[in-house]
Structure formats: C-alpha cells, structure tokens
Image (cartoon, helix red, strand yellow):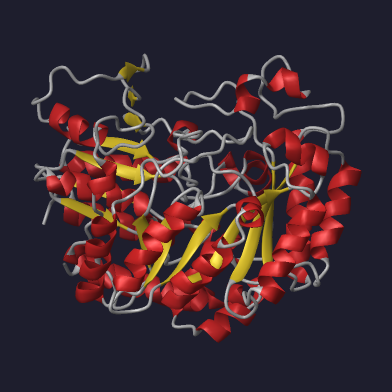
Amino acid sequence: MSVNIVIFTDSKPRPFLRYSGAYVIASALRRNGYTVQVVDHFLLLGLDRILTIIDKFVGSDTLFVGFSTTFMGIFSDHIRESSINEKMFTFSDYIEVRYGASTQIGFTHGVPISDIEMDAIRARIKEHNSKTTLVVGGTKANFLRQNQIDTFILGYADNSVVDYAKFLQGKNPFFQYTPLGDGRIMVDKDVEAIGYNFPKSSLFYEENDLIEHNEVLPIEISRGCIFKCKFCSYSMIGKKKNDYTKEKEVIYAEMMRNYEKFGTTRYSFADDTFNESVQKLEHFAEVFQRLPFKIEYVAYLRHDLIWRFPEMADILKESGLKSATFGIETLNHTAGKIIGKGLHPALVRETLEWLRDVKGWKNNILMSSGFIAGLPTETRDTVNAWVEEIMDFKYPLDSFYISSLFIFPDAVRSVKSEFERNYKEYGYYFDSTKSTGWINEHWKSEDAEYLATQMQQYAYGIGRTKSGDFQAMALYNHSHTWDDIYNMSYSTNKSDFYKIMKKTDEYYTRLINL
C-alpha cells in the first residue's frame, strides 16, 4: 500500500499529543490529490519498525519521505558527546534518556538519532524507489546535521510543499529553490505561504491517521505573533492584531467534523499568542458557545495582556481553557524589558495570584511558564534569585521549564532573531570559529545551559512542577481524569513510561495493518 508521501513526526516533550505541523502539510497535499501517510511517534517506534513501515508505504509512486522536526527531540551536542558513542543518539538511547533520570534538557538539532540509523533509513527508502527524496521541515529544519537529507523546506510550507511535489513529478519546471552546492536544495522562497488563504483553510484528519476516540487533537487557530521578542526566530512575528486568524465558520465546521468522526472535545491550540486581543477571544468564545458540547483546550498566552485587559480571565475560563502556557522568561526586570517582557515581576506575581485565587483558576486551570537563563544583563546571581522565587511552592505557577538562551548567528534560515542579527549590541561574542556557543561578560552558553538543566532537575526532584502546559493535555490521552492531571507531579508522570510504550505497540499494530 504505497503512498505518494510519507511524513514521520513526533512530539518528544508531549508523548501521544499530536503536533499539528505534519497534519497541516498532509491536508494541503491531500487537497491537491496526493496520498499521504503520517507516521507519528517516530522516535518511540525504533529502527526495525521504521524500516518495516518504509517497506509498507514506500513504492514506485512515492515522491518523498519527510521528517517534521519541530518537536522531534531536544538533545544538545554536549549531552551527545558525553553520553553516546559516535556522538549521536540511537533510538534505544533516546528512550533510555527520555525516561531515565539522566539529563535531558537541551536544544533541538533535528532528528536525534545516529548517522548509522539514518543511513539505514535512506538505504531502505532507496531500495524501494531510487528517485524518492528525503525531506525535512518544521521550525528546526535548518539545524538538521545529517547529510542523508536531500531537501530542506523552511517556514510555512502549505504552498511550497505542493509545489515541490509537482516539481518532483516534472510538472513544475519553474520551481524556486536555493542550491546548497552538494546536490541538496533548500526551499526558502515562500516561508510565509504568501497567497495561501489561511483564515479559510482547514486541517482534515483521515481514517489512516488513526485518530482515537475523544483523543486530544491539535487545531490551528491563528498564525504569527503580534510581538517581536528579541530571542524569537519564528516567522511572522510583529504581525497586526487579529490578522491570520481562522474564520468562525471554519473553526466551527472543523470542530464539529472532529466531534462527529472521533468524539473530539479537547484540543491543543496551535497559536503563538491566543489572547493577543479581547476581540479575538470573543471571536472564538462565540464559536465555542455554539457547539453542542463543551470544549477544553491548552494554549499559549501572554500574562501581561491579562494584566492589561483583566476581562480576558473570565473569557478564557468560560471558553474551556484548562492549561495556560505563559512566556514570562525571567523575573529580572532589566532583562525582561530588554527582551520585550517589561511587566514588573511584582505585577507578574500579583496577576498570577489574582488568576489563581480571585478568578477561580485554582483547581480548574493549570498555569505554566518558560524561563531563560543567560539573557542580557543576567548573571548567575540574578538567575539564582528568580529561580529561588519560583521554586517556592507558594509561587503562583503550577509548573515551569527553564532553558538556556540560544543564539546561532550563522544559522542558515529565513528568519533570525534580533539577538542573532545584532548579538554584539547585546554584549555577546563568539570565538573565531563560532564552534562554541555565545560568551558574554558574565558567563558562557554552556554554563547557562548546565545551570538551567540542574535547576530544572532539582525542581523535578522536589516535586515542585506539575505536569503542566501542553504535556498536561497529553495525559488525557493516557486515560487520566482532570483531577489526576491537575494534581500530578512531573515525576509521577514519568512513571507513565510503560503506558506510553504499550500505546506505541498498539499504534504500530494498527498502522501496519492498514
């Protein structure tokens, strides 16, 4: 049962919570007459099963096999080099590190498996069809190191992936791309999918996507972000409010279709800032109220917008929000103002306490946030100070994730962050080869990464963090109740390993029997 396109994807930080990217691309291709098989849980399946899947779905009519990298893995080079032979992870190493007690915090560099395994994957694909290409896409496509890849597709690929498929068929002789000089190409001429009618577009799940009954599904709500945080390298930042937002009837129809086909009532919202305006929240609240069922969802939010527009609190709660992921980033006011997060830390805490204790979010909505070590003006002492504050069980966050600042000025990609474009202006420099990370007057990037890792592991160890943000919604797919999820610590959640592997076995069996 070969198909035109196979897309491998995974969501490493959120086991069995699907990521929308691969399915958005599949929907675009399917609308244009191509047959597509999305294969989820790539890293959990293991090499032998991946090869069997290739045997089943790759054939004479297969144009390309893709890898969606956005949530594929989060292992940094220094962990690879200190932990694994040949400086690369294998599938089995991935599983051991993912669920073991060892360090696992780092940055995505692409598919975190060994060159030997990627060689085997490429060889098996080429056995079935020597013309089939290997493609990577997703937000981290530009970081992929493996030389087994033929094509790198950057940015929003709704248009370009269809144009690329036609190009492979010889039907698009004027296809635009950038040669990389070694026979490989980069598709980077339409990273914002100009002309694609996003507000009217839908994400369609098909029977061969193997959606389970009442599974939490991803859904695209909006694209881009009205803010321009200095560390952000995503495309479409600084957009206008309420631009690139799905129309009411499109979302209504999509949710009704998913409910009727799969019983879906829970969602993870694909939207960089769901609460970018009161009008936008009211726009979607009206849709959700029309549905003949109550939805629940997780979304990225800005805490400072809730402080500025307090009416957002009730709209979010009443519309079905169950897990809120903020981007506070730091409680150092000077650093916060530099990156575009200027709300004073005292007001941050006041807002979170107001949501929890006054607006009824306690027991009803989990609150989480990301934090960054290594921002401009920050020292070990300032980071230690705000980490000590959030480590306090009384601080009004249910969970948090601490990472280090990443600056890659030589990265080959269509969009670079302000820090990457002008790193010298913010006090960062690199050695002459740029082979190591950033350095500033206070510390080096590897020191910031090590500190962030140790702090996060400590938080896990003392039970300070619950299973918050998008991971909390993933637990619905493991048959947990809301009371279970709300009170579950991250450490307890890790004990779900055997459930995850059992679900992986079941998924593979269903997939191979299609």
Q: Quadrant of the N terminus?
A: bottom left
384 displayed left or right of 33: right
* 146 vs 280, nearest the viewer: 280
Relative image position of residue 129 (x, y in whole percent) = 16, 39
Q: Quadrant of the C terminus?
A: bottom left
What residue is drawn where x is 57% and y is 62%? 311
* 399 vs 164, nearest the viewer: 399
283 displayed left or right of 513: right
Q: Vertically, is 386 above or below 99?
A: above
Relative image position of residue 326 (x, y in whole percent) = 61, 55
Is any part of residue 52 visible from this angle? Answer: no
162 displayed left or right of 15: left
Relative image position of residue 81 (x, y in whole percent) = 65, 41
What residue is drawn where x is 64% and y is 71%? 490
What residue is drawn where x is 52% and y is 71%? 317
What residue is drawn where x is 20% and y is 41%? 127
Is any part of residue 259 visible from this angle? Answer: yes
